[in-house]
Every structure is written in C-alpha cells, then in structure tokens.
Image (cartoon, rainbow, N blue to C red):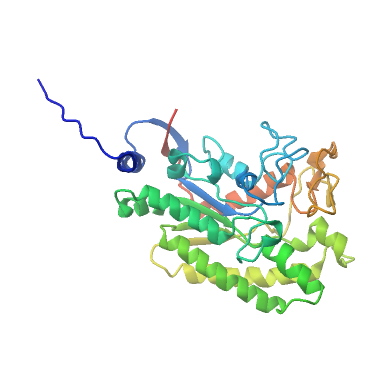
C-alpha cells in the first residue's frame, strides 16, 4: 500500500505550479484534445482593425458596442469596429484556429498560452496618439499586457516561457491612428511641428523600440503590417482636397508612403538580430481585386460628426453591405476586410508551418 503525503501550498504558488504544468503540456504536446493549426500560438497587437472587445472595458469614446456595429456578427455588437467579422477573425479562420483569439480583457489563463488579441481602437505607436478619445491601449501598453502574460507563464521558468513564445507567430498592425488622428489633422491645419519625413522618422524610431521589446520577450516570427492608402478613407475624402484621377487625398498617401519605406528598412535591420524573422507585409497590390464591392468612397452607415465618424447609434445601415468597401468614415466592411485578410495571410506564408501542427486545446 502506498502512502500519500499531501503538501498544502499557498494559492498563488499552487496557481503558478499549475500554470507551469500547463505550459509543459503545450510545449511537449502530451494529452488533451488536439486540433490542427498553422501556428503554434498566435498573438495580435493593433488598433480598431483588430480590436474585438478590449475597449469595451475602457473609459473611452473609441467604443462601438452598439448597433449597427455587429449587425452581421452572430453575437451582435461586441466591440468590433465593423458590421461583422474583422481582420483578426478572418486571420484566425485562415490559420485554422479553433476560434477567434479572445480579447486580452476576457482571456483565461489557457487562452494566454495559445494567444490573445491585445488590439485597442484608437491606439497608436506614439503614446500621445488616441488620448483625445480617453483611455486606449497604446502599443506600449499592449506590450505591457503581453509582459504580464509572460510573467504569468514564467511562474516557474522564464526560459521555458520564452521557448514557448519563440515558437509563436505575431501580427502587429499599428500606425493608422498616428496619422489619421494625430499627424494629418495638424499637418493640414499647419499646426504640426514636423514635416512628413520628420514625423515618419519619429514614429519609426518609437516603433523600433516597441518591436525590439517584443523580440526581447520572445517574439521571433513577427508579421508587421504597413499602412494602407489612408488618403482614400471617407473621412479624408470629406475633409481635404482629392485628386481628380484617384478620388483620394494624395498628399496623405504620400506622407504614409514615407512611413512605409522607413518601416521596410526597420524590418531589414531587425532581421539582423539572432533568429529574428520579422516580415513586412502590405495589403496594397498593383492589381487590387474588390470582388463584389462597387462603392469605395463613402460609408455604408449614417455617420456622426460628433463621434469621430462612427455610425450613429441605432441607425439603419445600407442593405447592400457586401458592395461597400467602408462601413463608417474610417473602417472597412466585413466584405472588404475578408479580402485584405486573405492578402495578409498569403504574405505571412514564410512565418507559417508548411503543414498544420497540433495545438492542444481544452474541450
């Protein structure tokens, strides 16, 4: 007969041990219910193009947990800045994850091992960006949340945690608000202290620090999304002179182009780091395909001039949503996001597994 010695640990200590065992379980893939995925684990950093509910818990006007947002999403309004699924949702589907990444605000300990979505609407690369909306999770704060996850993972072994995180894939998409909500309004009002080249340098210098911070915390396979043609969003078209040939504000697009070129150079520099696999990706193609989309210059919903060009709460949006590129004054429709997500996914191919690998999930 065996005798069992019961050791009573403090709750926090016991919790750390359990988490440590879970981490071992994931890394060595013992037991559990196995599901196929093209990534070992997946983390997202970004703004309203990926936010799926983090801002719901913040004191901010950058919040859309009301109709008509989510009108085409099964769960209704969830904090996604569109009518249905967003970029993060489509990437999860394309990567064959069991379900969309949960927002960090709602994530369980198990979620935090397999990956979470840190995205926050209104946030930017610079800490000052988005502060006019109230509380938003800047990229710096999103990285702090990620470090909190690492601390949790590292309860018994930071080395083991970093080993796990080095096998994860990361998607980072920041900078839209640094231009749309920070620099460009000042530029056109002639109140900015920076030329487009100077501002791009400022933003890239800060971005460099953030991405290096991610690397130091285990990030090795990192897809970094460049900025799109921001001069073509309805808010820009409504406020500033447009080109007769493109219908977009080309001075804004030119400013963004400077940022993107500097970002490409930064990615090359980061790849000089040991084992680094940073990848610059872009949704801009030479021959864009819009599928069934025919309306590209105006929003589908009635927008509010008072609330940052968001849809008027309770308003009735257009019925032919699959034919519109933009949902409100800034954000694409689900139809448009599905197209851009496929471009992003295809561009991420060098960071993905050549064959699906098993991820352990809790049934």
Q: Could you tell me which residue is drawn at 80 percent across and 46 percent down?
A: 311
Q: Could you tell me which residue is drawn at 59 percent across and 71 percent down?
A: 204
Kindly indicate the quadrant of the structure image that contains residue 244.
Answer: bottom right
Quadrant occupied by the C terminus: top left
- Position above or below: 256 against 302: below
- Position above or below: 91 against 146: above
Residue 233 appears left or right of 214: right
Quick check: can you spot residue 247?
no
Nearest the camera: 239 or 314?
314
- Position above or below: 278 against 82: below
- Coordinates of residue 116 in the picture (x, y in percent): 51, 45
Q: Residue furthest top?
A: 1
- Coordinates of residue 83 in the picture (x, y in percent): 74, 40
- Coordinates of residue 176 in the picture (x, y in percent): 68, 61
Q: Residue furthest right?
A: 244
Quadrant occupied by the N terminus: top left
Quick check: can you spot residue 113?
yes
Marks counted in the figure total 0
Nearest the camera: 183 or 286?
183
Q: Could you tell me which residue is drawn at 48 percent across and 49 percent down?
A: 352
Q: Could you tell me which residue is drawn at 64 percent across and 51 percent down?
A: 343
Nearest the camera: 353 or 129?
129
- Coordinates of residue 111 in the picture (x, y in percent): 47, 40
Nearest the camera: 238 or 149?
149
- Position above or below: 236 against 70: below
Residue 356 appears left or right of 205: left
Kindly indicate the quadrant of the structure image that contains residue 272.
Answer: bottom left
């Amino acid at each position: 007969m065996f005798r069992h010695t019961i050791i009573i640990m403090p709750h926090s200590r016991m919790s750390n041990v359990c988490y440590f065992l879970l981490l071992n379980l994931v890394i060595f893939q013992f037991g559990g219910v196995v599901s196929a995925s093209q990534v070992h684990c997946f983390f997202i950093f970004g703004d309203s193009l990926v936010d799926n509910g983090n801002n719901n818990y913040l004191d901010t006007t950058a919040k859309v947990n009301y109709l008509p947002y989510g009108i085409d999403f099964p769960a209704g309004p969830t904090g996604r800045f569109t009518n249905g699924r967003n970029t993060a949702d489509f990437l999860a589907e394309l990567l064959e994850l069991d379900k969309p990444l949960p927002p960090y605000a709602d994530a369980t300990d198990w979620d935090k091992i397999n990956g979470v979505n840190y995205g926050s609407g209104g946030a930017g690369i610079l800490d000052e960006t988005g502060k006019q909306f109230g509380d938003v999770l800047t990229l710096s704060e999103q990285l702090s949340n990620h470090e909190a996850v690492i601390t949790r993972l590292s309860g018994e072994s930071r080395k083991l945690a970093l080993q796990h995180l080095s096998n994860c894939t990361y998607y980072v998409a920041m900078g839209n608000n640094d231009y749309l909500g920070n620099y460009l309004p000042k530029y056109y009002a002639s109140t900015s202290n920076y030329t487009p080249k100077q501002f791009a340098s400022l933003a890239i210098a800060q971005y460099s620090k953030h991405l290096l911070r991610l690397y130091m915390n285990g990030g090795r396979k990192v897809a970094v999304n460049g900025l799109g043609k921001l001069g073509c969003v309805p808010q820009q078209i409504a406020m500033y002179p447009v080109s007769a040939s493109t219908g977009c504000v080309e001075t804004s697009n030119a400013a963004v182009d400077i940022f993107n070129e500097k970002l490409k150079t930064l990615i090359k520099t980061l790849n000089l780091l040991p084992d680094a696999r940073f990848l610059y990706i872009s949704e801009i193609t030479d021959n864009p395909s819009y599928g069934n989309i025919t309306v590209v210059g105006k929003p589908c919903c009635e927008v509010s001039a008072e609330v940052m060009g968001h849809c008027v709460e309770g308003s009735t949006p257009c019925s032919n949503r699959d034919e519109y590129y933009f949902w409100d004054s800034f954000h694409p429709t689900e139809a448009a996001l599905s197209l851009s997500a496929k471009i992003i996914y295809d561009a991420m191919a060098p960071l993905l597994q050549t064959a699906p690998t098993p991820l352990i999930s809790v049934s």
